[in-house]
Image: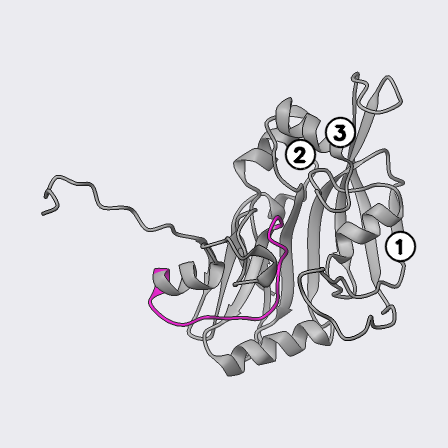
Amino acid sequence: MQSSDTPTAIPETLGVLYQDEHIIAINKPSGLLVHRSPIDRHETRFAIQLLRDQIGQYVYPAHRLDKPTSGVLLFGLSAQVAAELGQTFSNHNIKKSYIAVVRGYCPSHGHIDHPLTEVTDQRIVKSQTAAAQTAVTDFQLLGQHQLDVEIETYPQSRYSLLALQPLTGRRHQLRRHLKHISHPIIGDAKYGRGRHNRYFTEQLECPRLLLHAAQQRFKHPVSGAELCINAPIDTCFAGLLQRFSWQDALPVEWRSKKVTKL
């Protein structure tokens, strides 16, 4: 018989950014899958299941965020509302803003128009590789920092803080576009640079992909109201911004949990 003094495990909870009778938005932590995937068969934690248990009802994802990416993640509280939200994403009627730390000094702004082919995995059988699809990303420089450390071939190592706006929604778009312009995102095990990733993990206490979905602006699928949902960065990301003197570089509205009806 189990002792009555045995502590009860505290259920894991997710940070809710917005909720009404139709939709819910959470601040997905880095390292959490949205749902089960054949690519990560060993995983037992999923945003869908955790959120369902947390609020006591089924939830339906309207879009996806990569496992290592944090930030705003939208769900419908019915399949119909989720489908309508999904159509909003498909029609590009939503404005998404991300922040990322990348290798090198970037220009003040940029427009990346580089088509992308479908991302496949050797463990998933695909009949035929599809043609490259249009993929467009805009970015703005928020900050720059130099470390007097030789990580690759130069005596100093340079980094930029960027605001990113994907104008299309291809898989791994931001990560692949930043690699394409030779400014890979720090912490990206698939498209990044291993030496920089290891340095940030071992020396700067930041063992994660430094990509965060900071804000989403869209029309509510039922009321039609314009919503602006912001997700604050986690302790790890915030600590790095402080270390690099970037704590004031983010727009004020991105620094805390905030929902605005425009």
Tag 3: residue type?
Arg
Where disc 1 sits, the SS reads strand
Q: Is residue 180 above or below residue 6?
A: below
Q: Tell me how far mark 1 sits from mark 2, CA to CA.
A: 24 Å
| Tag nearer the camera, 3 or 2 | 3
From the image, give the main secondary structure of the stretch colored magenta: loop
How crowded pointer 2 is (Cα within 10 Å; few <14, some 14-19, many 20+) is rated as: few
Local SS, label 3:
helix
Mark 3 → mark 2, Cα distance in angstroms: 28 Å
Instruction: Reply yes or no: does residue 9 show up in magenta.
Output: no
Q: Position of residue 166 (x, y in %)?
A: 77, 59
Q: In the picture, residue 162 is in which quadrant?
A: top right
Q: Position of residue 30 (x, y in %)?
A: 56, 46
Residue 163 in the image: state x and y as whole percent.
75, 47
Side of 12 relative to 60 (left or right): left
Tag 2 residue = 248
The residue that disc 1 covers is 111
Q: In 3D space, how far apart are the residues under numbered discs 3 and 1 (Cα atoms)?
A: 27 Å
Which mark, residue 195?
Answer: 3
Q: Quadrant of the C terminus?
A: bottom right
Q: What residue sits 79% from the left and 31% below the top?
A: 159
Q: Amino acid at mark 1?
A: His
Range of residues picked out in magenta: 54-69
Q: In terms of image quadrants, where is residue 237? A: top right
Q: Which SS class for mark 2?
A: loop
Relative to 8, 96 lies left or right: right
